[in-house]
Image (spheres, grey):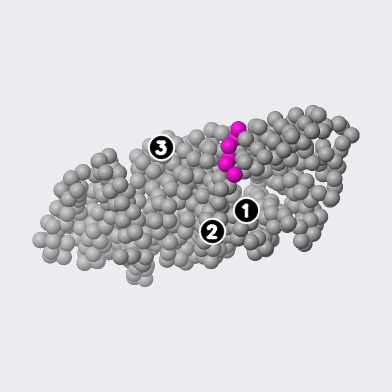
Amino acid sequence: MAIRLVLLWRASRAFRAYNEKGDLALLERAIESLRRALAVTPQQDLTIRASMASLMGQVLQARFDHEGALADINEAILALRFAVSVSGWKEPSHVHGLGSALRARFERAGQPSDIKHAIEAGRDALAAAGPHHRHRALYQTDLARSLAARHSATGWQSDLDEAIALSEHAMRSLPSANPDRAYALCNLAFMLHCRYKRTGEPADLENAIRIGRQALSALGTRARDRPWMLSNLGVALLSRSRVAAHSADLDEAVSLQREAIRGGDYDALIHLANLAVTLLTRHERIGSLPDLEESIAISRRVIAVNRHPSTLAASRSLGLALLARFAQHRRLSDVTEALDVWRRALAETAPGHPSRAALFSNLSITLQIAYEHTGHPPHLEGALRTARAAVLRFPKDHPDYATALSTLGVALHLRFEDTHRTADLDRSIVAGHLAVALSGSEHADYAGRLSNLGHRLSARFGLQAKRTDFDRAIRCFRLAAGLRGAPPGHRVTAARGWGLTAYRAGRPDLAAAGYVKAVALLPELAWLGLDRATREHHLATNAGLARDAAAALVATARSRQAVEYLEAGRAIIWTQALHLRGDLDALAERAPGLAARLSEIRSALEQPGRHHA
C-alpha cells in the first residue's frame, strides 16, 4: 500500500512538472512509476486501478503528442476506456480524458468514428460534471476542440459555431489567474481564425490575433503549450498579411514559427509546415529567392514523415513553391514534380474533405503552366476540368471562391488562345470580373487579378476594337500598377500591360505613361533588402522595359526623356552599389543588427497608411 502511494505521488509530480517544463524525461519517469504502481495493485481493486489507468491514459497521450507513436495513443485509449467502464459517469475526468485521446488519434489517423466518439465523450463529460464543476471550463474547451477537428474534416459550419460558443463561455468563466485560461484563450483564437478562413469576416481575424496575444501573455510557466500558441498566432498574422499586405505581420509570422519549432516536440512538424507556407508568402511579396528555397526544403522534410497531420499543408506549400521556382528558373522538372504533389494529395484526401476544392484549383493552375510550355492538349482539358471542379466545390461565400474563379478564367483564356473561340474569351472575362469584385481592394492578389482582367479585355479589344474594352483594360492596369501595398511584381506586370495595350491601340502618349510607371517601379522590384542574385534576376526578367519606354517617348517627340529612361533602366544595380557599397548579405556579415534594422524599416515603409514617426 505504502509503495503504491509513493509511486503514484512520483508519477503525479513528474507529470505536473512535464506540463510546466515540457521535458520528455519527466514523462518517462511518470510512465515508469505508473507501470510499477499498477503491477503492485491487486486486480480486484477496480476503483484504484481505474484512477491509475486514467492517469496513465493522460501521460501516454502526452508522450504521443510529443513523439507521435500510434502505439502510445492506442494504449492510452484502452486505459481510459477501462477507467470509464469501471467508474461510468461518476468520474467525468475519465470520460473527458477518453474524448481527448480519441480526438488526438483522429487528428493523426483520420478515422471518422474516433471523432464521433470523442464528441460524444465530451458531451457526456459536461453532462456528468454539472454546471458548477471546477473543471467545467476545461471540458468545454476540449469539446470545442473536438468539434473544430470535425469541422476541419467535413466543413460543417454548425460544428465550428458551437465550438466558438463553447470556447467563449469557457473563457468568460475562468478568472485571469486560472492556469487553464491561456489554453482556453488560444483555443478560442484558433477557432475564430478557422471561421475567418471560412467566411472572410475581418472581425474574426482581428479578434483571433488579439486573443492569441492575450493567450501568450497569460501562459506563465506552461512551456509545453507555448509552441502551439506561437504557431497559431503566426498563422493568423499570415492571414492578415495576405489580405492587407502588411509586411510587418509577415515578418513577425516567420519569427513566431521559427520560435515554435524550437519546442522540439512532434508538433514541430506542424510548425515547420506553417513556416514553409509563411516563407513562400514572403517570397511572393518581396521576391526573396532564399525564402523560396527554404520553403521547398522544409516542405519536403515534412512530407517525408509519412501520414503526419501536417502532410497536407506541406503538400500544398511544396506544390505552390515549386511553381514559384519554375517562374524564376523555367525548369519543367519543377512543374512535373508539382503535378505529382497535387495528384498525390488529392488521392490521399477523402472525397468529402473541404481541402479538395483548393487542391483542384492548384492542380488546374499547374496543368495550365504545363500546357503553356508543352502544348500537350490533355493538360489544357485537365486544367479546365479541375478548375470547374474547384468552383463547384467552394461555397459562393467562401473567401477562396474568388481564387477558383480567377483560375477558371485563366484556363478559359488559354483555350481561347488555342481555339480563338470568342465564347471562351467572354467567359474568361466574366470570371475575371467576378474574381476582382469578390477580392476587395486590400486583398494581396487584387493587383494580379486586375492585371489578368486587363490582359483579357485587351485581347478582346484587339479582336473587336470596342472602345469600352480598351478603356476598361487601361483602367484595370492603371489601378493595379498604382496599388502601393501590392507585390511589386504584380504592379510592374500591370504597368507593362498598360503600355503595351496603349501602344498597340495607337496611343503612344498613354503607352509612354504605362512604361514610365513600370520603369519607376523597378527599384521596388529589386530593392536593396534582397540578395544580389534575386535583384539581378528581377531586373533581367524586365530588361526590355526601359527600351519600350524610350520607344513610346520617341513616338511622342520626347527624345531627351527617352535617353534618360534608357539610362535609368540600365543603371539601377550600379546606383545601388554606389549608394551602399555592397548588398544586404555583406551588411549582415559585418553588422547583423543594422541589417535587421534595415529589414524592419522596409517592413514599416511597405505598410500603406500605417507609417509612424
Residue 37 location (% of width, % of height): 77, 32
Q: CA distance from mark 2 to mark 3?
A: 46 Å
Which class describes the residues within 10 Å of circle 1: few (<14), some (14-19), or many (20+)? Answer: some
Disc 2 marks which residue?
A: 214
Q: Furthest-left residue in view?
A: 560
Magenta extent? 20-25
Residue 3 location (% of width, % of height): 77, 31
Disc 3 marks which residue?
A: 332
Picture disc at residue 192: none
| Residue 24 on the magenta segment | yes
Picture quadrant where residue 349 is located: top right
Disc 1 marks which residue?
A: 179
Which class describes the residues within 10 Å of circle 3: few (<14), some (14-19), or many (20+)? Answer: some
Residue 285 location (% of width, % of height): 38, 52
Query: Regarding mark 1 in the picture, which secondary structure is present there?
Result: loop
Quick check: 316 above or below 565?
Answer: above
Residue 366 location (% of width, % of height): 47, 45
Specify the amino acid type for callout 1. Answer: Pro
Q: Residue at x 17, y 62 (%)?
A: 553
